[in-house]
Image: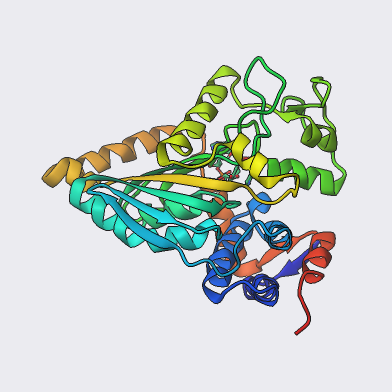
Amino acid sequence: MIRLTLEQARELAQDILRSNGFSEPHVQAVTATVLAGERDGCASHGLYRLLGCVSSLKAGKVAADAEPEVIDQAPSIVRVDARGGFSQLAFQAGLPVLLAKARDSGIAALAINRCVHFSALWVEIEALTDAGLVALACTPSHAWVAPAGGTQPVFGTNPIAFGWPRSGRHPFIFDFATSAIARGDIELHRRAGQPIPLGWGIDAQGQPSTDAAAVLNGAMLTFGGHKGSALAAMVELIAGPLIGDLTSAESLAFDAGSRSSPYHGELIIALDPRRFLGEDADRHLGRAETLFASIQGQGARLPSQRRYEARGRSAGQGVQIPQALYDDLRALIVAG
Ligand code: NDP
Ligand code: PYC
């Protein structure tokens, strides 16, 4: 393992993205996301993702200088056309309008279209909980996951993230793939030559497997059997056809074997408790604290608790990544 300060990790990400020709707004937006992932102990969506950023660019599957277009679609709906660029900048472009609409109407949605998407969703959810809003986000990916009872990939890993703002505390946030695990995690197991647990996927013959490479070439499985399968289908629908964008199967077809990051849409919904509750907002938000206390009071942890603890540690100690990943990342920097 090699240790980097957060500043060194930031410079590494920026050098890779800038030297490969991404525009400065994309350099900053993507760096912020992968740095946040590494800082929070989410290795599958940290610096590792820069490998995919560059390979997607080389395959002609992401626009390096795309300028997102913000479209005021309806009183409670803002749309952002990412124009083939990474999703992060499109989210940033739509965020002020989403906040204004949610505060105005109590509930609003941001639909991002035509984006290349590889990031963890909690980064975006935190932008909304920081503004005092309740938030929900989901996105398809590539068709890698078999439906419960089947063996052929249909769904993406289709994450769902939810956030709840808390006064004076980190927000309550969960963010997980509807597959048993994110694909990025299986890729990291393959890179490290480690087996994966049974239940994450099946090989190309439909047999349960602990071989990461075999599962990546076969099919991943949903979490929670038919329940994860139905949630994955919901994500395909509301972050696909509902917003006029691609399903995971369509994204994979668009990829045409280039193994680039998925290309599709994302749906983000924001709810303003102060609009729902008026003067009673603080009283009811306080009742949520009773719920959280009853979870933690028996020794269970809240989702994101591990992440916030990692964030605290990284602030002082920096981050650690495998030497092989560091070498692969350094090799991406184009000498100027
Ligand atoms: P996990 O299965 O590790 O689950 C993650 C969530 O569950 C986190 O909120 C985590 O909190 C929480 N959690 C884990 N263990 C516990 C526990 N014992 N008690 C309470 N909460 C717990 O993650 P996934 O592999 O499913 O997803 C990882 C990331 O991958 C997500 O951020 C997701 O957005 C991203 N992803 C992105 C995709 C895309 O298309 N852009 C596709 C698929 C995934 P904590 O972090 O604190 O451990
Ligand atoms: O880890 O499943 C994943 C993933 C897909 C797209 C971005 N991350």
- Locate the C terminus and report the quarter of the image it occupies: bottom right
> Can you name the residue that lies furthest to the bottom here?
336
> Is any atom of residue 261 visible in this view?
yes
Point out the quarter of the image occupied by ligand 1: top right
Q: Would residue 319 be found to the left or right of residue 291 on screen? A: right
Q: Is residue 300 above or below residue 152?
A: below
x then y, percent, for residue 255: 68, 46
**Residue in the image at 79% along x and 71% along y:** 330
Q: Is residue 303 left or right of residue 21?
A: left
| Position of residue 105 in the picture relative to residue 6 (left or right) | left
Image location (x, y in percent) of residue 203: 81, 26
**Residue pictured at 64% horizontal, 44% vertical:** 254
288 is higher (above) or lower (below) than 328 = above
Quadrant of the rendered image containing residue 164? top left
Image location of residue 23, percent across then percent down: 57, 74
Q: State which quadrant residue 72 falls in.
A: bottom left
| Residue 268 or residue 244, whichever sits in front | 244
